[in-house]
Amino acid sequence: MIGLEHQNGYHAGYEQRKRDEDKYRCYWSYNDDGFWEGECGAAWEFTTGGPAKNRFKFCFKCGHRIKSYEPGPRPRRSKK
């Protein structure tokens, strides 16, 4: 059985790893011109679907893992 302090340490490590992963993501959103664009300045037009449906995993410009938002208001990103 795992001790409580080990469980809490694992949880804290997991949370830190998730924050670190968010630093190295390129957030893509659909713009009014019909293109998907990333925070790094990358832009791409898909004939159907978006980055996830077309199996785009990494941004071709900055190389970070893509996180995409469907068309609509974009959620705010914390500046931690």
Image (cartoon, rainbow, N blue to C red):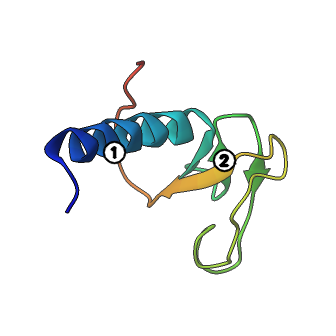
Left of 18 or right of it: where is 61?
A: right
**Viewer-nearest of labels 2 and 1?**
1
Characterize the local packing of mark 1: few (<14), some (14-19) or many (20 or more) Cα atoms within 10 angstroms.
Answer: few
Q: What's under tag 2, amino acid-wise?
A: Glu
Q: Residue at x 66, y 47 (%)?
A: 37
User: Marks 2 and 1, how far apart in space?
Assistant: 35 Å
Residue 54 placement (x, y as % from top left): 67, 78
User: Looking at the image, can residue 74 be seen?
Assistant: no
The quadrant holding residue 41 is top right
**Residue 10's disc number:** 1
Quadrant of image for the N terminus: bottom left
Q: Residue at x 80, y 40 (%)?
A: 62
The residue closer to the viewer here, 67 or 69, is 67
The residue closer to the viewer here, 31 or 3, is 3
The residue closer to the viewer here, 28 or 11, is 11
Left of 41 or right of it: where is 34?
A: left
Q: Which residue was labeled with disc 2? A: 37
Q: What's under tag 1, amino acid-wise?
A: Tyr
User: Is residue 39 positioned above or below 4 on the image?
Assistant: above
Residue 34 placement (x, y as % from top left): 63, 59
Quadrant of image for the C terminus: top left
Marks 2,1: beta carbons within 8 A: no
